[in-house]
Structures are given as structure tokens and as C-alpha cells.
Amino acid sequence: MIETDLSDVEVAALAARVGAGVVRDAYGRELARVDKGAGDFATAADLAAERAILDVLRAVRPEDGVLGEEGGEQGPGNARRQWLVDPLCGTLNYAVGNKLVAVNVALRGGAAAVADPFAGEDGEVFRTDGKTAWGEDGAVLAPTAATGLVDVNLDPPFPSAPGFRAVELLAHPDFVAGFRPRVVSTSLALAWVAAGKRAAYVTDGGDLADSVHFAAGIALCRAAGCVVTGLDGTPVGEGPARGLVAAADAVTHARLMAMIRETPARPGPGGAV
């Protein structure tokens, strides 16, 4: 029986925790795949985790809408509020036995939670009410660039090419001198930036503010005090921003932005730049 008298942040955390439990329980099994085209796919675990999350949201927020990675828009068509759900971010990792995955649940413009299903015995849930961000133990998240580790998403497509390519950033002399790259390719890295486990996260892409993949991680980072912008420096939430640069502090963000702006343009089709 699910309690119905829960705050939005409690709902987000509970839904993410329930989804993470499904993901953890299904790990290692031979799972059916659903082809989504262009090399993308979902597994039975993605679908089951999303159903479990939807069960929580329907029980405690029946008047809210939901946008799910697998099921699309569901719930009341005239809902004033909408939950963004990615039940298994890092499906390819998961399908090949890599545990670097996340479960993302975010209320558009409000509370959010990111669950790491495989941290410890029962997983770890990072959560925010939109103003403050907390870890599993209830401690306020404290981002820091001390690790010098920067996660960079190298997955195609590259919407900002030829002006920006992550491989050029990794080869920049200042990057080599000041940071060390890591490649997680899942929004779990955003939670790690908020929690001080990473100095920054960089990805190409479109406007990711309301993406089911990134909304929860962005919310965590912003509430924790990170600097979160698009590749052009536009603050996320203050206008269309392409891609994402989430840094633990302003100094780290400025250093990365300077390198990104220096990324040499490659010739486009027909030699155009």
C-alpha cells in the first residue's frame, strides 16, 4: 500500500526507487529487446520499470500527466503538471552487463530524483525539491571539482558539429593538463556532478531541459549549486540551449567553455564550415 500524503520530492524518490528495484532484479537475465530504430532499443527491464514507476505516480498523483521514455504521453490530457520518466537510462550498458545506469523521475519544473540501482545493496537515490539536493543519507549534496574527472558523452549524433566535437575537447591541451576524461554515457553522471563525484559533464544535443533523459539530473545539479548551461553558455531554463555543460563550480565551467569555444570547426558537406 502506497501512502498518498507525500510531497512531490518524496513521490519522485519513491518512484525512482521502485523503478531501480525492477532494474536491479532483472539484471543478468536474458531480456527481450524492442527495436526503436537507428540502433536504439529497449529491453523488457525498461518496460517493466516504467510500468512500476507509473503505478506509483497513478496511485499518489492521479491528476498529473506523464511523459515516459517508452510509453510516451499518458494520463489526463489537460493535466497542469507532468512527470518526465526515463526508467532505464543507459540501456546499452545494462544490456551488455555494465551497471552504469540510472532511473530518472522529474516533475517538469519541480522535484526530481535520480536512482543508481547498483550503488550498495539497495541502490542510491539522489533527490531534490527544486531548491536543495540531497543524497541517500539525507546529506545536502556538495559539488566539487576536486576529482578533476569530466564525463563526456561521445554518442552520436552530433547536432553541434562541425562547430563542436567532444573528441576535440578531449584533445585540447588545457583539458589534458587540467582534467581526466570519463565516459559514462548515462545521466547518472549528472547526479555524480551534483554529489561531488565528478567535476563536470559535457554532452552535445538539442534543448535538453525537458528531456526525459536529462531533466532529473539537471534539476539535481541546479539545486546543488552547479553551473548548468548549453554549449553556447546559455543557462538551462532561460531559453533554448543546445547540448549541456554541467560543472561543479563557475571556474570549472569557464575553463571548459573556453576550450569548447576554441574547438576548431570541421568542413561540412561540400566543404562548408
Image: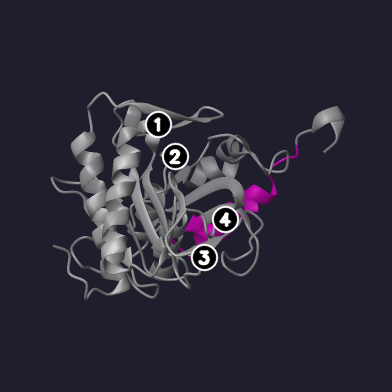
Q: What's the CA distance linking mark 4 and mark 2?
A: 22 Å
Q: Secondary structure at mark 3?
A: helix
Q: What's the CA distance linking mark 3 and mark 4?
A: 9 Å
Q: What's the CA distance linking mark 1 and mark 4?
A: 31 Å
Q: What's the CA distance linking mark 2 and mark 1?
A: 10 Å
Q: Amino acid at mark 1?
A: Leu
Per the picture, the main secondary structure of the magenta-coloured stretch is helix
Residue 21, placed above or below residue 195:
above
Q: Does 137 sit left or right of 72 as displayed?
A: left
Checking the image for residue 250, the label placed there is 3
Question: For mark 1, does the 10 Å Cα neighbourhood hold few (<14), some (14 to 19), or many (20 or more) residues?
Answer: some
Q: Which residue is mark 4?
A: 255
Checking the image for residue 92, the label placed there is 1
Marks 3 and 1 in Cβ contact (< 8 Å): no
Question: For mark 2, does the 10 Å Cα neighbourhood hold few (<14), some (14 to 19), or many (20 or more) residues?
Answer: many
Residue 172, placed above or below residue 219:
above
